[in-house]
Image: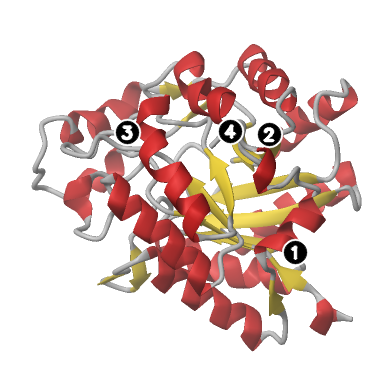
Amino acid sequence: MAKNRKVIITCAVTGAIHTPSMSPHLPVTSDEIIDAAVGAAEAGAALVHVHARNPVTGQPDQSPEAFEPFLKVIKQRSNCVINITTGGAPTMGVEERLGPCAHFKPEVASLNMGSMNFGLYPMLARFKDFKHDWEKPYLEGSKDRIFKNTFQDIENILTTCAENGTRFEIECYDIGHLYTLAHFVDRGLVKPPFFVQSVFGILGGIGPHPEDVIHMKRTADRLFGDAYQWSVLGAGRHQLPIAAMAVSMGGNLRVGLEDSLWLGPGQFAKSNADQVRAARMIIEGLGLEVATPEDAREVLQLKGADKVNF
């Protein structure tokens, strides 16, 4: 029965897309990331997806040392599933991006399924003033930057993390990424259940039109049948509309300040928890339930928080 279905909320609390000058509410320091993750979990997020930043400049930092101060504290303060990025930032090489997951052995790691253009430069039309020297060149540089995720890169991440019992939030920014996942499934390098995170609205990936959402779901259904859990994230202003559509189609959702700084038109989200609460209203308004961390661990067949290295 639909009323018994539980919807998994993932919250990506800071990411590497937005820069500190864009919002005063973007978590940068370890304490801010801790409060954001715990607040999101308390609001209903079963998974929190984490990146690290330089605490002074806010620049993405993918060193294990940058993750160390907040991973243990989040785990102590919350039962949520902690999902560590292997995406890092598009400016980083795969070995740098893989470092934290290889070291900390989380229950879940994110994994991008293809090389792609990743255009952040249109945000320069909205944001003009920057506090730090790195921010504007970082955005401008995305016009001539490829986010590299080759077959070899993906295989490297899969084999390294799989040895630790880590499962994956498999980020698919376009239809071809689903076929790349199917390729690795055929090779036996990814085991079901697959947690497929479809990403809509990033310049360089699939768009945010409802037909794009339907096409992604229909293709995943054909390729993976009932062997996967579908989740979506919509970039920017598309976050909640796409979440609502996906939940009504049987999916799960991701929110968070990594993906969108907004709660409504012209209205900053003051916290990640604000977006989680908005997502929860959609879920419960449709007569569904929000999954707990233990629900998510069961559905995704995770190894458990006692088997991580933090």
What percent of the width, then of the height, locates residue 154?
A: 65, 21
What percent of the width, then of the height, locates residue 248?
A: 71, 74
Judge left or right: residue 133 versus residue 77.
left
**Foreground: disc 2 or disc 1:** 1
Judge left or right: residue 54 versus residue 40.
left
Which element type, helix, strand or loop, lies under badge 4? loop
State the count of labels: 4
Judge left or right: residue 48 versus residue 169.
left
Residue that label 1 marks: 295
Determine contact: label 2, label 1, CB under 8 Å: no
Which element type, helix, strand or loop, lies under badge 2? helix
Residue that label 2 marks: 177
Quarter location, residue 110: top right
**Foreground: disc 4 or disc 3:** 4
The residue located at (40%, 50%) in the rendering is 258
Determine contact: label 2, label 4, CB under 8 Å: no
Mark 1 or mark 4, earlier in chain? 1
Determine contact: label 2, label 3, CB under 8 Å: no
Task: Please state which amino acid type lies under the numbered disc 2.
Answer: His
Which element type, helix, strand or loop, lies under badge 3? loop
Residue that label 4 marks: 309
In which quadrant of the rendered image does the N terminus lie? bottom right
State the separation of the CA atoms marked 2 and 4: 30 Å
Mark 2 or mark 4, earlier in chain? 2
Which element type, helix, strand or loop, lies under badge 1? helix
Task: In the rendered structure, find residue 60 and report the number of the disc placed on it.
Answer: 3
Task: Please state which amino acid type lies under the numbered disc 3.
Answer: Pro
Task: Please state which amino acid type lies under the numbered disc 1.
Answer: Asp
